[in-house]
Amino acid sequence: MNAISPASVGAAMQEDPQHNRFWARFAWFAPAVAVLLAVTLYPTAVVFWLSVHRTRLYEVVSGVGLANYLSVLTSPAFLDLSVNSLLYVFGALAVVLPTGLAGALALQNIAQGAAVVRTLLLLPWTLSMGVVGCFWLWLLNPSYGPVSFLMRSLGLEPGLMLGDPSLALILVIAVTAWWSFPYVVVMMSASLQGIPAELYEAIDIDGGGLRTRLRHAVWPHIAPTLGSTALTLGILYLTLITLILVLTGGGPLGSTSTWSFEVYSSAFRSVDLSPSSVISVVVLLVNLLLGYLYTRLTGRVSG
């Protein structure tokens, strides 16, 4: 029997195309996987670890299992945070989606100057949330803001505006919708431009009006884009902190505090990080659920 030399094994490996392709793919994707592990999976694992322990700052004191989850998820404070978070997310979506769609439909019917109008509409989306928050904080100032001045000119009492617990969340929702309105307009405009002109012509020949156009031409084409846009913004709103921080700081009386804002604020004022870690896990799970729905809706996952 002939012995197999190491040189012949090395030559056979070099001649194996599948073996070479494997290592080529590994060389390409290894850095990306390493970055993913470093900035995403490792911090996520740390948060899970802290959520099942009692801590003193970042020092683990003792393991408590699921006791932290039971304590946080059954507390009245978490119920208030959940109500605020859901009202904030769905309230902003309820405002921005129909107005963004209406804006896209209006832009489609502008014969001249549509490009200029689109550019101006994009301005809020290009601004940072800190700038947007400061701008609206000035507009809604109850003492000298333009909105309060206009209301007094009309004989109305502006009240405390963002300082009113019953009104603050509504105003934060309105500002959030104003900031994200351009994104919806762009997405809907791109979807509307993909509708064949022949479809409109066929509806006109059959004697159909605006309602028929919207039902049989516009809606079937924009529904997937509208759904994916809603899910994208929903994920964004769930993790949004800066705008709330600048406008209200979570107040007054916690009326604008959401899950993510509570995680941010409690990380700086609390000695035990486990409650904020539990809420972080809740936000993560909700975002994963929305991400799954997004991939199913956009067709990026088969089956």
Image: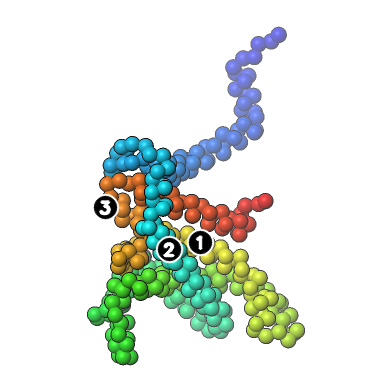
**Does residue 111 lie above or below 21 as drawn?**
below
Q: Is residue 153 above or below residue 229?
A: below
Say whether residue 292 is left or right of residue 167: right
Taking the spot 64% from the left edge, 70% from the top edge, the residue there is: 221
The three-letter code of the residue at mark 2 reads Val
- Residue reaching furthest right? 206
**Is the Cβ of the residue at disc 1 closer than 8 Å to that at disc 3?**
no
Secondary structure category for the residue under label 3:
helix
Helix, strand or loop at label 1? It is helix
Q: Is residue 149 above or below residue 291?
A: below
Residue 21 picture location, percent across and down: 61, 36
**CA neighbours of label 1 inside 10 A, class few (<14), some (14 to 19), many (20+):** some
Q: Amino acid at mark 1?
A: Thr
| Nearer-the-camera pick, 179 or 147 | 147
The mark found on residue 124 in the picture is none
Q: Residue at x 50, y 82 (%)?
A: 113
Visible residue check, residue 97: yes
Which residue corresponds to mark 1? 232
The residue drawn where x is 35% and y is 54% is 263
Q: Which residue is mark 2?
A: 83
Tell which residue pokes out farthest to the top in this image.
1
